[in-house]
Amino acid sequence: METPNSEENINAPRNAERNIKETVDKVSHTAHKAVDKMTNVGYQTAEVIGEKGEQLKTAEEQLVEDYREYIRDKPIRAVGIAVAAGFLLSRLMNGCRAAHHH
C-alpha cells in the first residue's frame, strides 16, 4: 500500500526540474531586459556624444573663421600677438627644461 507521501516523492524530481526551469527562465528574462536597457543607454550616450562632437566642431569652425576675419582686419596686431605668444611659449618651455635639469 502506498503512503500519501510516496506520490509526492515520485513527483518531487519533476517538480524540482519545473521549478529550476521556471527560475532559469525568470533569470534569463531579467538578464535580457538588463542587457537591452544597458544597450539602450549606450546608444543614447553615443548619440549625445555625437551631438556634442558636432557642436564642438561647429564652434571650432566658427572660432577659426573669427580668427581669420581678425587677421584680415588687423594684420599687424595679429602678427604682434603671434610674436608675443611665441615668445611667452619659448620662455615657458625653456623654464620647464631648466627646472628638469636641476
Image (cartoon, grey):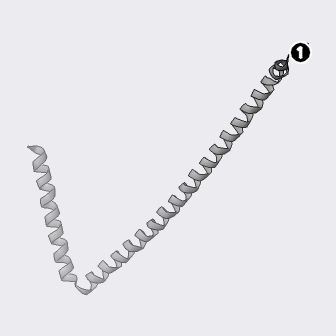
Percent from the top left, x then y, of residue 20?
A: 72, 31
Note whether 25 is above or below 90 in the view shown: above
Looking at the picture, tell me which residue is in the foreground, 56 or 93. Answer: 56
Looking at the picture, tell me which residue is in the foreground, 58 or 98. Answer: 58
Quadrant where the image shows the N terminus: top right
Note whether 13 is above or below 99 in the view shown: above
Percent from the top left, x then y, of residue 41?
A: 54, 56
Quadrant where the image shows the C terminus: top left
Residue that carries the numbered disc 1 in the rendered image: 2
Q: Which amino acid does label 1 sit on?
A: Glu
Which residue is most to the left? 102
Looking at the picture, tell me which residue is in the foreground, 34 or 93. Answer: 34
Q: Left of 59 or right of it: where is 97?
A: left
Identify the residue at image location x=17%, y=68%: 85
Q: In which quarter of the image is residue 57?
A: bottom left
Which residue is most to the top? 1
Percent from the top left, x then y, of residue 92?
A: 14, 58
Note whether 59 is above or below 1 in the view shown: below
Q: Quadrant of residue 11?
A: top right
Percent from the top left, x then y, of residue 13?
A: 78, 23
Q: How crowded is mark 1: few (under 14 residues within 10 Å), some or many (20 or more)?
A: few
Which residue is most to the bottom? 73
Q: Left of 73 or right of it: where is 12?
A: right
Q: Left of 13 or right of it: where is 98?
A: left
Note whether 20 is above or below 87 in the view shown: above
Q: Quadrant of residue 68?
A: bottom left
Identify the residue at image location x=27%, y=82%: 70
Q: Left of 55 or right of it: where is 40?
A: right
Q: What secondary structure is marked by label 1?
A: loop
Identify the residue at image location x=69%, y=41%: 26
Total labels drawn: 1
Identify the residue at image location x=16%, y=76%: 80
